[in-house]
Amino acid sequence: MKTETTIDLKQVEDFWNNNLCGKQFVDAKFPSKEFYKYYRDFRYKKTHHLDIYIDWKSATNKDVLEIGLGIGADATRWAEFAKSYTGVDLTAEAVYATKLHFEHLSLKGNILQGNAEALDLPDANFDIVYSHGVLHHTTNTQQTFHEINRVLKPNGQFIVMLYAKGSFNYWIRIQLYFRLRLLFEILKNKLGDSSKGNWALHIHNFKKDGWSYLSWKNFPHHCTDGPDCYIANIYYQSEIKDMLEKAGFKVEKMKKGHFPIGGKYPKLERFFAKYIGFHQLVWAKKQ
Ligand SMILES: C[S@@+](CC[C@H](N)C(=O)[O-])C[C@H]1O[C@@H](n2cnc3c(N)ncnc32)[C@H](O)[C@@H]1O
């Protein structure tokens, strides 16, 4: 069985190189200027809490580091205000996409390929480190927190989003509905029918990994960013707090976001997300 302990960083890199985060949501030619505009429109409409909860302007006169870039939308938000912006991603694809994004908007930034578990950056160098939906995908999340603490200046701020266990998505959608649905798809395949889309990929993985694919601990990894994603850890608030404190941070604020129910009523989505949202945002200070 493949679990987070047996997956190495090369496999994480390969997955994200082949699945540039968010690209699938935009119906425009990558990497045109139009593509990036549509992507930003899509992102801040769907993940509407970001422009409300994240104070991009707080980067004014500050040195900002972002870890895990995807298409580089949040990168452009930070770079608009920061004194300096540095972005690091494990994959050549995200580095390429973000560099082009900056070129299209005439923004300045230092975009680098690198690993959050061993940052090739000096100690005490940044005022803010931001990482959205990234550090739960790596092989050693605790180690990334130590690295981030190292590169932050004294009293520097760390803003991180990790997937939340105390959420509708984890308990109802993934552990209950997805699990039952996959059991149904397995039965369907046994009776000679075939599955479509992501369910076909789940069936393929199930045939390869056996029943362990569906285990309580393993299955959620494959139910957030696609069936072929092998590391997507989901945490309780208390677990995140413990990891941050162990790495020398003091947690200042925690807020949950992301409860998509069609996007027509963003205020209602944010209300539900506060209690059962999937994105756990944390603001912490280097001690
Ligand atoms: C789900 S995407 C999130 C991207 C972006 N922050 C967003 O919110 O759209 C995860 C990104 O994290 C990067 N990543 C995963 N593990 C990493 C690591 N150890 N170091 C640096 N980047 C990593 C991947 O290459 C990928 O681009």
Image: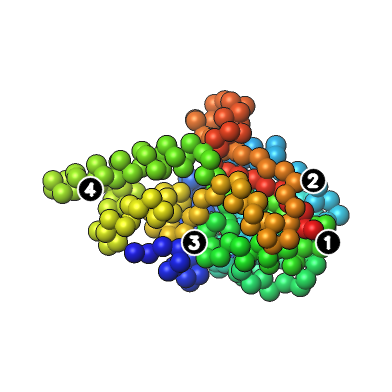
**Is the residue marked by circle 3 packed among few (<14), some (14-19), or many (20+) residues within 10 Å?**
many
At numbered mark 3, what does the secondary structure look like: helix, strand or loop?
Answer: helix
Splitting the image into 4 quarters, where does residue 263 fall?
Answer: top right
Q: Nearer the viewer, residue 287 or 134?
A: 287
* Residue at screen point 68% across, 65% down: 146
Residue indicated by mark 2: 57
Question: Answer yes or no: do the residues labelled 4 and 3 have beta carbons within 8 Å?
Answer: no
* Residue at screen point 72% across, 43% down: 253
| Horizontal side, residue 37 vs residue 208: left or right | right
State the mark number for residue 4. none
Q: CA distance from mark 4 to mark 3?
A: 27 Å
Give the percent coordinates (x, y) of residue 210: 27, 59
At numbered mark 2, what does the secondary structure look like: helix, strand or loop?
Answer: helix
Outermost residue to the right: 61
Give the percent coordinates (x, y) of residue 266: 59, 29
Say whether residue 195 is visible: yes
Residue indicated by mark 1: 154
Q: CA distance from mark 1 to mark 3?
A: 32 Å
At numbered mark 1, what does the secondary structure look like: helix, strand or loop?
Answer: strand
Residue indicated by mark 4: 186
Residue indicated by mark 3: 16
For ligand 1, tell me if the residue under mark 3 lies within 8 Å. Answer: yes
Q: CA distance from mark 2 to mark 1?
A: 20 Å
* Residue at screen point 61% across, 28% down: 271
| Horizontal side, residue 43 vs residue 195: left or right | right
Q: Amino acid at mark 4?
A: Ile
* Residue at screen point 64% across, 54% down: 242
Q: Quadrant of the N terminus?
A: bottom left
Q: CA distance from mark 2 to mark 3?
A: 29 Å
Q: Nearer the viewer, residue 50 or 5?
A: 5
Q: Amino acid at mark 2?
A: Lys
The answer to which of marks 2 and 1 sits earlier in the sequence is: 2
